Image (cartoon, grey):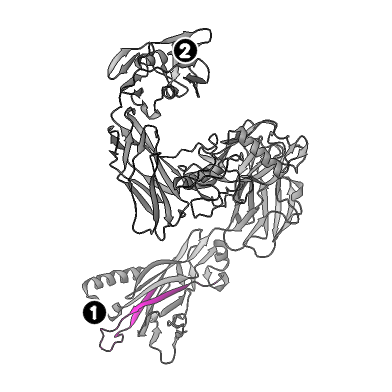
Amino acid sequence: MKRFLSMLLVSSMAVSMVPATAFAKGDVMATAKVLSMLEVTKNAVEENNKIINQVLGGVPELQIKITDADYRHTADGLASEDMEVTVSLDNAKFMADQDFTELVYVRDDDRGLIIEKGDAAEGSRLTVSVNPDDIEEDEVTFTFSGNFEEDDVIAIPLYSVIDKTSEGRTATVSVESDMLDVDALTYVEILSEGFKASVKELESIGLEEFAEINSRGLKIEAAVGYLPKELTLKLNKGFEFAKSCDGLQGDGYSIERESDTELTVTVDGNREDITIKGVNSSKGIVIEAATAKAGDIASIKISAKNVDSTSVAVLQVVDADVELRVDKDEDLPIIYSGVGVDNYGLTDDSDHMSLEVTLEESFPGAWDLKKAFKLELPEGVYVAQQNADGKNGVEVTDVEGLYQNGKKVSASELEAEFLEAYQNGDYQEFEFKKRTFDNTDASDKDKCAKMSFTLALVADPTFEGDVTLKLTGDAVEEQEADIATFVKAYDVRAEQNDLKIDYRHTEIPSDIVVTEAEAGLWAEKEAVFQFAIDRGDVMQFEKDATFTVDDVSDMEINDSTSKNTGKLAFQVKEESDEEAAVVTISDMELYMSRDIPAGFYDLELTTSMEEGSDIDASFSGKGSSEGYLGTVLLGGVQGKDYIVDDVADYENVVKEGFVNVITPGKDVEGFTTKVVVPVGKNYIKSGDKEIELDVPAYINADGYTMLPVRAVAKALGISENAVLWDQPTRTVTIMHGQRIISMTLGQKYVTVNGSALPASSAVEIVDGRTFLPMRDLATALGVTDISWDSVTRTATLNGNQ
């Protein structure tokens, strides 16, 4: 190797001083690689006297391939001198007394041999020779005379002897020539002897119960070569192998139970791996949690003579448990949000079905089925009435060990229970009430409670991301599993517009841009988009907005401003082709009521896709399939009212604060509506309307009636966008007519249009809700008729109205 380093240094110096064109061989370029790299164990190499030959499974080969051979600048177009190729080994030596001319061979691009065993083929353009003075233990120089051609391959089998055989060591080969310089190509790697062992996933086992390892079995693989003929499997403390393990036979193995904690596995023939899971029986390796405690993990140690051992975890002890799971090898289904199961409005053919979900107790009696439990979906995701095949939106695929009043529950009966549970959960979650099912018989080892099902899902048009199903309940550990993914069928871009009230034809300076999720997705005649401002009673779009489709997608649309509704709409007339479509709405104008409150107003989008989704959105089976938005919008007859408001209250805001009214309308001439506030009740009355409260009014420590601010705004007829909360200053602001009323947490004064007035009490936050003192708010609004009935605990504004 010292000689090699010296040659390399001299060579690099010479090349740096002499032009490359001075060497004919500089016009020959090559690459090098090792074929059939050998991976062997230390024992195997040492048993073969460290010799690398066919006994170890084959001989690696150094191959040098000519990538360019250009002799055009030479006088005769041929090589003018010999080409030398020096091959060096590291951590290895060439075999002693080896005839290197008999070793090397050369073939051309037609795979014909040019040189074989030192002899050139007749009429060959190449010969090879080796000068004995150029042979060392770890280095040899070959001399090639004649012409190389592109795609010629020089092949040199690397018969050699390894110096060091410790685990992780390698033997490498290097090449030096005018054609190429390549350093340290590995041709032998010494591996440790041992195993790799794995199970698909941990199974659960109850205290003092029996359980089988994962149904896909325990896989044992040799790190290199073949498995030993005999393996020992040993359990850790607290666990025992069941007697049923004795005599198990499988593909390439048999098992004997030596003791409670030890098995002997005999491997048949030469096998690189085996999978132990039992044959002629549904049972595989069965383990008992004999003295283990909750949380302990059963591990199997695998060992053999003269081989490193390995361990693999197979079971985990649980006190009582039910498992929520899906097949982790299955990809999450991709579903478009805001669309019904028939994908009305889209060309997509997905079926809206989730992954199959399984709930199963770890052992009989582990799941206290008499206690309530819930299956929760994310907000904005719903279970459809039916799937695409017309079956129930919850399709039970398997049910075992479930009983009601001693009678086994069938798949159809379980689907009916899902319907009941969905109704109990207000169509937002499945709420299985206590005593829905009987507990399983803990003495019957074959009756674990299990249910498997799929869900037909639809989602809020603004919902995007994974659908995570959550299991909760008094007798179960909270668990989650992703069962589907929703993506949006379109993207909407819009900017906030600060506008002053101008009554008619108030210009909106920015555009609305709608982009198709992928080319050809929006279906012609079915895909309809309709934009509106959230307060249609005080703000509407004027006619004659401009709708523009990009010039590359080939989409065509019909557009209109709906009569008497103040909404902007367009329908796909012809689908996009190679590129996704982009629709731009510009030149928009607004009609604005004179008394519109200052504040933010959202941009909302309703689509024919969403209307179809509304139809499907309830597993309750309510609703009608008539009256798609497209029919109404473009001159058809409006169908029945089919939207189930208490089920699918969709969030279809695509731009919060699209319009910001920065000047309020005219002042309201006094607030005269009668408002009745019964303390402790979940409602207040405003005129003839009863408004529900999620948190009731209460009497604070100062003795004043406190009202939830959002409900008060609704009672006063104020847009929620005109009720603002500033977190940094902890200040609530209400804009009513030309009045801007502000109160700050903990401060006993109220500000009306910038003037501070003393307050009887301060703003308070209870259960995450902001409450205002009723008397101070009334004063700020100009109300003087305020009364309190201590018998009914009721406060009233404008009681004489």
Q: Is residue 529 visible from the viewing direction of this image?
A: yes
- Magenta-colored span: 58-87
Locate the C terminus by quadrant: top left
Q: Neighbour class for label 1 at 10 Å: few (<14), some, many (≥20)?
A: few
Task: Using the image, tell me which numbered label, if any, was put on residue 22.
Answer: 1
Residue 733 - label: none
| Drawn side of residue 93 relative to residue 551, left or right | right
Front residue (pair 175, 217)? 217
| Residue drawn at the location 48% of the way across and 16% of the way down | 677
The answer to which of 81 and 131 lies nearer the viewer is 81
| Residue that badge 2 annotates | 795
Quarter the N terminus occupies: bottom left
In the displayed structure, would residue 228 be above or below residue 14? above
Question: Looking at the image, is 561 positioned above or below residue 106?
Answer: above
**Residue 457: percent from the left, percent from the top?**
56, 45
Residue at disc 1, secondary structure: helix
Q: Considering only order in the chain, which callout, 1 or 2, is on the residue closer to the N terminus?
A: 1
Question: Is 81 inside the magenta-drawn segment?
Answer: yes
Counting other residues with Cα less than 10 Å from the Cα at mark 2, is it few (<14), some (14-19), or many (20 or more)? many
The stretch drawn in magenta includes residue 18 = no
Q: Position of residue 678 (x, y in %)?
A: 50, 15
Three-letter amino acid code at the position of disc 1: Ala
Q: CA distance from mark 2 to mark 1?
A: 107 Å
Mark yes or no: residue 238 visible: no
For the residue pair 629 and 427, the one nearer the viewer reads as 629
The three-letter code of the residue at mark 2 reads Ala
